[in-house]
Amino acid sequence: MTSEITKAAVIGAGTMGSGIALVLAQAEIEVNLVDTEQKYLDSGRERIDKFLESSIKRERITEEKAREIKTLINPMLDLSKAVKGIHIVIEAIVEDTNMKKNLFKELDELCESEVVFASNTSAISITELASVTKRKEKFIGMHFFNPPFLMKLVEIISGEHSEEKYIEQIKSLCVKLGKIPIPSKEAPGFIVNRLLWQFLNEAYRLVESGIAETKHIDEAIKLGLNHPMGPFELSDYIGLDVLLQIGEYISEKLGEEYTPASLLRSMVKDGKLGKKTGKGFYEY
C-alpha cells in the first residue's frame, strides 16, 4: 500500500467532481479529471478557473499559486490513460447504482491492484458498489459535500469488506486536504443525507398540504433553527433531480415513510431542477 497519495484520478467533471479535483490540487496532489465528453471537461475547468479567479481577487491566493494549482489538474477523456500511475480513484458521476457499478467494473480491470477505490456517492451501498471489483478491501465511501472546496465535512463510509488500514489512509488524505473526516457505518443515506432527506421531504409535504408557503417555511427555519439556508433554498442549491435520486434510493431500502413527495417528483418532471436550470422552488 502506498502510504502517501500524490496522484489521483477523479471520474466525473461535474460540480462535485471538478470541486474534488480542485481540492486535491490545492493540496499539491496531481489529479487527472476524467469525463466522457469534452464539453463536460470544459465546464469543469470553467468552474475551477472561476473559483481561483475569485480567490485571487479576494487575496486568498496569489496568481502564481493559482497557476500551480491549474497545472496539477489534467482534464482527460481517455480513462485507461487517466489511471496510469495513480494511487487513488475517486468516482463522482451521477447517482445511479448501475452506472457506478459498470464504471467500477471497468476501472478494476484498468487500474493497478494497489489503487484504492473511493466513491463520492450520497447514499448508495459501498458493499454493493465494491461487489463488482476484486479489491473489496480497498473500496471506501468518500462523500464530499457541495461545494467541496468550501465544505469541511467528508463522510468516510466503510463497506462490509473495507479494511481498516485503507480507511485510515483515506482519513489521512482528508486531513491533508484540510477536511474533517467523519466515519459512518454503511446505511442508506449514511449520516447527513439520511437525516437531511426526512427534513427536506417533510418541508415539501408542508407545502403540498397547504400548511405554509415555500418562502415562509424557509424564513421560519432560518430564524427558528439558525440554518444558513431554508429547505427550499438548499434544495435548489443541491439540485432537485439529485435529491429525488437520493430519496428514491433511501425509500427503496427503508420503506414508504421515506417516499419522495409528489411535489418534488412533479418539479423534476417539469425540468425545474433548481439553480442549475434557473428555476426550482425559486427563480434565478
Image (spheres, rainbow, N blue to C red):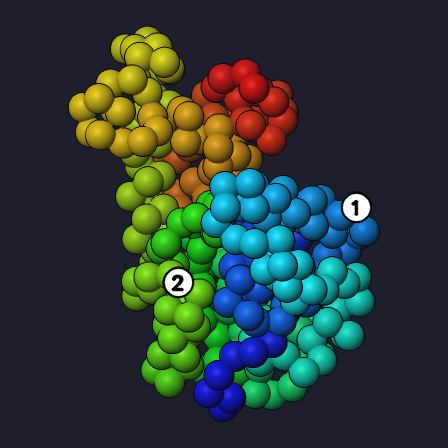
How crowded is the residue under tag 2: few (<14 C-alpha within 10 Å), some, or many (20+)? some
Mark whose residue sits in front, 2 or 1: 2
Quarter of the C terminus within the rendering: top right
For image coordinates 60% across by 88% down, the residue present is 113
For image coordinates 77% across by 74% down, the residue present is 80
Whole-percent x and y of residue 40?
74, 48
Q: In the shown orientation, is residue 70 left or right of residue 141?
A: right
**For this rendering, which residue is in front, 199 or 279?**
279
Above/below status of 271 relative to 111: above
Above/below status of 171 relative to 207: below
Above/below status of 37 relative to 257: below
Q: Is residue 174 visible?
A: yes
Whole-percent x and y of residue 251?
39, 43
In the rendered structure, which amino acid carries the disc numbered 2?
Answer: Gly
**Circle on res. 178:** 2
**For this rendering, which residue is in front, 159 or 20?**
20
Mark 2 element type: loop
For image coordinates 48% across by 37% down, the residue present is 238
Whole-percent x and y of residue 20?
54, 57
Q: In the shown orientation, is residue 209 left or right of residue 166?
A: left
**Circle on res. 284:** none
- Tag 1 or tag 2, which sits nearer the N-term? 1
Q: How many badges with numbers are in the image?
A: 2
Residue that badge 1 annotates:
39
Whole-percent x and y of residue 137?
45, 82
Q: Is residue 136 visible?
A: no
For image coordinates 50% across by 41% down, the residue present is 58
| Location of residue 255 by image quarter | top left
**For this rendering, which residue is in front, 69 or 230?**
69
